[in-house]
Image (cartoon, rainbow, N blue to C red):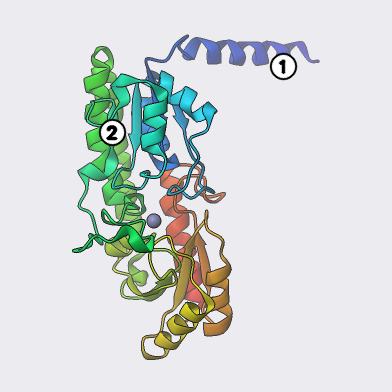
Amino acid sequence: MNPLKTLVTVSVTLSFWLATPAQAALRVLACEPEWGALAQELGGPLVDVSVATTALQDPHQIQAKPSLIAKARNADLVVCTGAELEVGWLPVLLQQSGNAKIQTGQPANFAAADFVRKLDVPTQVDRSQGDVHAAGNPHIQTDPRNIALVATALAARLQQLDGGNASGYADRARDFQQRWQQAMVRWTAKAAPLKGITVVSQHKAFSYLYDWLGIKEVAVLEPKPGVEPSVSHLQQVLASLKAQPARLVLYAAYQDGRPSEWLQKNASIPAVRLPFTVGGSDGAKDLFGLFDDTTDRLLGAAGAAK
Ligand SMILES: [Zn+2]
């Protein structure tokens, strides 16, 4: 090997190790990838982030496996969506962890949905038919304005829990918000042609995205959030599109796309797979990529559908 190249490799490796603290100040366990990505943006080298789920898993349905319980046991902060998204697994995980500081109501238990205005809040709660959105729609990360609100609250929480590094978190939060606001201006301008288009959703996963971009949801393939559509229900949705046509049918990366593909074939509209969270597509490598890719996919499909 070229000695100069060896020297460069050694010095790059050395500077990497020097830049990495021996022990990160705060161990963060995020329930979903978007909050892991946000904690990383706001904490940088001050945090050690692990994420309980991937973009290809349904966040409503996760097993509290021993490896996850071990992570919860050692966590200094858990960052989850709340609004009952994790109601099927997080209470078990918290209880099994034996970690008193991350229990509900403690400062080290952060629920993102507490800091945004919730949509689809039912007037009557009825979980008996399998509705998994009984506390309102929990998929708040599909609107970048919500990310900004949660970022403000999460930065404050990091400063509260790790006071010694408060100025570091404040600097990173300021920098993130500046870059985020600029990106939102760019996305909003780029996505303007989507305003008023009509769509069908497979799961009620994108209410916040539609609220942000002025997209109109005319039908949902799941008869209730979390309930798989039967063929007769799909037929009903198809029939309803005669009176109220839709341009696209949208589903999240973690979902089995077959109901959307059925509608694509039978209604002759494009089925669009959206990343839904960080890691849900090759383009959604971080929070910025998530919205770059989401708007690209919607614009591409809506253009093709004209
Ligand atoms: Zn849902």
The residue nearer to you, when weighing 230 against 114, is 230
Residue 107 percent location from the top left of the image: 23, 26
State ligand 1's quadrant.
Answer: bottom left
Label 1 crowding class (10 Å Cα cut-off): few <14, some 14-19, many 20+? few
Q: Is mark 1 within 8 Å of ligand 1?
A: no
x, y (%) of residue 132?
Answer: 36, 56
Q: Nearer the viewer, residue 127 or 210?
A: 127
Which residue position holds label 1?
A: 5
Task: Tell whether label 1 touches label 2 (CB within 8 Å).
Answer: no
Residue 230, image x and y in percent? Answer: 51, 74
Say whether residue 71 is visible.
Answer: yes
Q: Position of residue 79 (x, y in %)?
A: 34, 34
| Location of the N terminus (image quadrant) | top right
What secondary structure is found at the residue carrying circle 1?
helix
Name the residue at 49% across, 54% down: 275
Please identify the residue farthest to the right as the structure is shown. Answer: 1
Which tag is nearer the camera, tag 2 or tag 1? 2
Residue closer to the observer: 135 or 21: 135
Residue 208 at least partly seen: no
Q: Is residue 259 above or below residue 172?
A: below
Q: Quadrant of residue 81?
A: top left
Numbered badge on residue 151: none
Please tell me whether residue 179 is drawn above or below residue 129 in the rendered image: above
In three-dimensional space, the C-alpha distance between marks 2 and 1, rounded to whole angstroms, equals 46 Å
Amino acid type, residue under disc 2 in the picture:
Phe
Please tell me which of labels 2 and 1 falls first in the chain: 1
Q: Which quadrant of the view contains residue 245?
A: bottom left
Looking at the rendered structure, the kind of residue marked 1 is: Lys
The relative height of residue 90 versus residue 1 in the rendered view (above or below) is: below
Q: Residue at x 30, y 45 (%)?
A: 147
Specify the label residue 110 is tagged with.
2
Check the image and name the residue furthest to the bottom.
243
